[in-house]
Amino acid sequence: MNLSEYKGIFVFAEQRDRKVQKVALELIGKGKELAKDLQTTVTAVLLGKDMLDEAKKLNYAGADKVIYIDDDALDVYMTEPYVHALHTVVMDKKPEIVLFGASAIGRDLAPRVSARVHTGLTADCTSLDIAQDDDDKEKLNLMMTRPAFGGNIMATIACPNFRPQMATVRPGVMKEAEYTENNKVNIEEYKVNMPAGCKNVEILDTIKIIQEKMNIEDANVLVSGGRGMRGPENYPILEELADLLGGTISASRAAVDAGWVPKDRQVGQTGKTVRPNLYIACGISGAIQHLAGMEESDYIIAINKDEYAPIFEVADVGIVGDIFKVVPALIEELKKE
Ligand code: FAD
């Protein structure tokens, strides 16, 4: 394999309901950083139907170029047409790096594409960097870091002998690229012939679950409860605090496993990664697997009666005290405002 033929960074721009997902913007943000080190460009690859306006937004978010494939078979995610289309583009354009979100779609798509192009894939990365190759100082490799052995160690993996280097990246870990005033549009409308075998599955109907509460990955403020909450009957005080702050509630795995809070509220290594402006941890000890999902929050307040709880190590403000006294006092103060 001639590695020098492979150039540029590709970001798979995941869409649902013809809307580009937040994770795509996070990958563009990270892709731009990596591109600086590699002195290369970032290309977003968008697969869908009637999505030209969304394609332009990827340019506005900082993608140097957008490859857009418009096809009926790509309107809603289905494994076979997506794998076929992406495999075709990757084989044709030969990118050096391909990034996907570690979402349900990315986890289904990325391993199949990597197998077809005969390269490796590092799944569920939490950090990406560029480093010089140990043997060939001219060569730069992508260093892909992910939790291993139940989150007890972080493994850094490289793919020095194959290209493209491929990774799925946890949603919420990387900082989202912001839309710029620069309205330069650079879109290549790319055609892929879909073989008949791509249409083995047809979606007849989609039933959506209507969420009453805000998705924790989208919330600016999270009030998170752990085992210290003692039971589901005590969560209304966290809901009240979250409502006053314009946020929603989340939880540690201990609270989810106990059945106090639904699984989609779990923060951490086996839950969701969140990056709110404010994260208030109530009765959460701060196990490494929990920290993995929230330590990138902008501002962290921890309330715990144990002054040695590890959560205080990542907190900007730590309150040593009983949640059942501190939280009602906070609510009272906020109500005065
Ligand atoms: P505890 O560790 O029991 O802490 C409760 C805290 O509440 C204590 O610090 C205590 O001092 C405090 N407290 C009690 N009463 C009060 C009170 N009245 N006022 C103030 N403070 C009080 N965990 C996650 O959260 N997310 C994950 O995604 C996750 N994934 C995991 C994956 C693996 C492979 C493994 C092995 C574990 C995982 N865990 C995860 C579990 C993790 O190791 C911890 O067990 C869990 O986070 C503990 O939850 P907790 O902090 O709520 O409970």
Image (tube, rainbow, N blue to C red):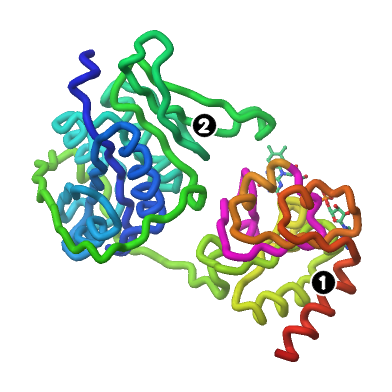
Question: Does the CB distance between marks 2 and 1 fall below 8 Å?
Answer: no
Kindly identify the residue that appears in the image at 43 percent across and 67 percent down: 208
Tell me: 175 left or right of 62. Answer: right
As drawn, 102 above or below 14: above
Q: Nearer the viewer, mark 2 or mark 1?
A: 2
Q: CA distance from mark 2 to mark 1?
A: 38 Å
Of the numbered discs in the image, which one, if any, rests on residue 234? 1
Q: Specify the quadrant that holds the N terminus.
A: top left
Element carrying mark 1: helix
Counting from the top left corner in percent of width and height, residue 27 is at 38, 47
Q: Quadrant of residue 191?
A: top left
Of the numbered discs 2 and 1, the one sitting upstream in the chain is 2
Highlighted magenta segment, given as a residue range: 262-287
Q: Residue at x 16, y 33 (%)?
A: 93
**Residue found 30% across the figure and 58% down from its top:** 61
**Label 2 environment density (alpha carbons within 10 Å; few <14, some 14–19, many ≥20):** many
Q: Secondary structure at mark 2?
A: strand
Q: Is residue 214 left or right of residue 317?
A: left
Give, as a three-letter code, the residue at label 2. Answer: Thr
| Nearer the observer, 198 or 15 | 15
Image position of 268 with respect to 281: above or below: above
Q: Which residue is mark 2?
A: 145
